[in-house]
Amino acid sequence: MTPLQRALSAPKAELHIHIEGSLEPELAFALAARNGIQLPYDSVDALRAAYDFSDLQSFLDLYYACADVLRSEADFADLMYAYLLRAREDNVIHAEIFFDPQTHTARGIAFETVLRGLEAGAERARAEWGMSTRLILCFLRHLSEAEAEATLEEALPFIDRIHGFGLDSSEKGHPPSKFERVFARCRALGKPVVAHAGEEGPPAYVYEALDLLKVDRIDHGVRASEDPALMARLAREQVPLTVCPLSNVRLCVFPEMRQHTLPALLGQGLAAMINSDDPAYFGGYLGNNIRALQTAFDFDDATWKTLFANSLKASFVDDATRTAWL
Ligand code: HPA
Ligand code: ZN
């Protein structure tokens, strides 16, 4: 077996996947038909042809538009099950899955419909092959903190079914400091918290996520490589970084994979691992990310082992489960 084959077959966790970003064009058209909705594209191919992004915002515009086909509990269940089935092929044994309730409640879909649907899809995967999952509620950072607070209120009746909180959407101009108070409430509920930072935003946003939001992991964080003091701190404190290589190339954070900072992050001892982010939109699931990295960097077995151990170590499961995996 080659290092690539061993990497593909190794057990691993995925900790940065937006469930709405796993909506494949085929499923989008099927759900549009089921719900009597007209998508603004004639065909699967026409929609896929629109996946030509220049930055994060150009992607988010399409991502939010496509999410409109998600209406019923069954739609969310089908979406979740399709992702988990695909993740299984790449030997993902545990997935911590972001969902964006505000994208749905703003369209009149009840919070409970979203949650119950996602849970039903996850339960089907658990029953069929023992898939392990957690749900992380993300606040949309282009909206106000008051709107995030209102979303937290909506989540409170279901709080035992929410495993953590995150922060996503348009990063530039929406620093973590904007959400300091609502994150303090999430932490006071005993929940782990994470935030996207240092994807398109500057290293200062990573400092804010650490110092003001007191996050347990940084999502992306790749721009930390611009700040040596921040790199040293992330290494010293072993802050997990959920890096998404294909996403970064597709959203033009790096012009090509060979310019990705993942080798530098690992070389300086940071607790980075790889994830797919929005696999339907960015050219692939975890296996596709592994193949693209191997083509660019020809990682050895030890590097792959570190990446997958970092993913399992940074997961929000109990210690006994984590120890059994490692
Ligand atoms: N960045 C920020 N917000 C997001 C992303 C992303 O890559 N995907 C879905 N929401
Ligand atoms: Zn993301």
Image: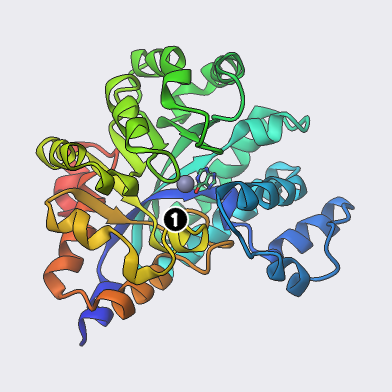
Q: Which of 148 and 142 is in front in this view?
A: 142
Q: Badge 1, how many Cα within 10 Å: few under 14, some, many 20+?
A: some
Residue 94 x %, y %: 35, 52
- Left or right: 276 as drawn, with respect to 50: left
Quarter of the picture containing the C terminus is bottom left
For image coordinates 64% across by 30% down, the residue present is: 102
Residue beneath disc 1: 253
Amino acid type for the residue under numbered disc 1:
Val
Q: What element carries label 1?
A: loop
Q: Can residue 323 be seen in this view?
A: yes
The answer to whether 207 is drawn above or below residue 98 in the figure is: above
- Depth order, front residue of 204/283: 204
Position in image of residue 206 (x %, y %): 32, 34
Give the residue drawn at x 61%, y 33%. Answer: 101
Q: Which is nearer the eye, 205 or 283?
A: 205
Instruction: Name the image colouring.
Output: rainbow
Q: Which residue ends up furthest to the bottom in the rendered image?
A: 1
Decide if residue 77 is on the left or right side of residue 206.
Answer: right
User: Looking at the picture, does residue 138 appear above or below residue 12?
Assistant: above
Instruction: Inspect this view and state whether residue 90 appears.
Output: no
Residue at 20% from the left image edge and 47% from the top image edge: 313
Q: Where is residue 22 in the image (x, y as percent from the top left)?
A: 57, 57
Front residue (pair 312, 284): 284
Q: In the rendered view, would you say 180 is above or below 66?
A: above
Residue 131, horizontal then vertical, whole percent: 39, 55
